Amino acid sequence: MKKRFFNLFILMTVLTLLFSVSLFAQDEPVAVTADQGMKFDESPQIGGFEAFTRSIVGSGFVDLFIDGGFAMWPILILLVWGLAVIIYKIIALSYAKISINALLDKLIPLLKEKKYQEAANICGKTKGPVAAVIHAGLLKADQGVGAVEKAMESAGTIEMAFLERGFVDLSTVINLAPMLGFFGTLVGMIQAFDAIAKAGEVDPTIVASGINVALITSAAGLAVAIPVQFFNNYFLGNVDGLVLDMQRGSEKVVETLIEN
């Protein structure tokens, strides 16, 4: 269920991006009527989607995106991909986080009274991987402590796989965004030197366009990678905390069972 939700979330985000790109690509210059016959305006008229984008993120960002050239499109895809994964991880981790002390305060008295089924029912109604691990162990309480430990270990491995979902995607964005920015930088420098070769002289106005592309793409790649790296580290810290909670809860339950 969690895997299908993750895949569906990413798929919907990518489809939205592709639809937006297709609308952006359909924006074309249109003819305007003058007093003396029909002639085309020298500057293209802004299309509907581009105008909407300018109203949302500002004309400055849209102009930078256009000036950056074709390398900006894969960087944009990485940005949307990274944002989709970040939103998914925020939702998933907020769902997984519970108060381990409050849960143990409910379970320990029941375990001391050997009301294992009632304790298992409480865990079954509690969200998050900590409750899921303890629930798996309590279902084996009648088979001994060894069976409980084994069940918790297996459940912990499964929950860890779900908690780690999305980190590969974030790492991909972190690594590829600066690389694509550097690729755009090389393309811009190639354009600048090509313009110098054709002109036969070094003029700042000649190389300005190529250098502009180089700087924009490098900045865009870093602008995508830096915040994604921050969220990646933040999520890793949250996952480490959940792992400690799972270990603490499991050990407390096993200790209580051994005492009884």
Image (cartoon, rainbow, N blue to C red):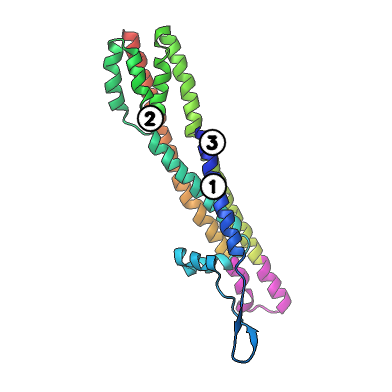
Q: Secondary structure at mark 2?
A: loop
Question: Residue at point 49% right, 32% down?
Answer: 162
Which mark sits nearer the N-terminus, 1 or 2? 1
Residue 235 drawn in magenta: no
> In the image, 102: left or right of 190?
left
Q: Which residue is mark 1?
A: 12
Residue 129 got which mark?
A: none
Q: Which residue is mark 3?
A: 4
Q: Nearer the viewer, residue 218 or 138?
A: 138
223, above or below 213, in the image? above
Give me the C-alpha separation between circle 3 and circle 2. Answer: 18 Å
> Could you tell me the amino acid type at mark 1?
Met
Name the quadrant of the C terminus. top left
Q: Which residue is mark 2?
A: 127
Query: Which range is magenta?
Result: 190-213
Task: Report x, y in % for residue 56.
Answer: 45, 63
Q: Secondary structure at mark 3?
A: helix
213, above or below 175, in the image? below
> Could you tell me the amino acid type at mark 3?
Arg
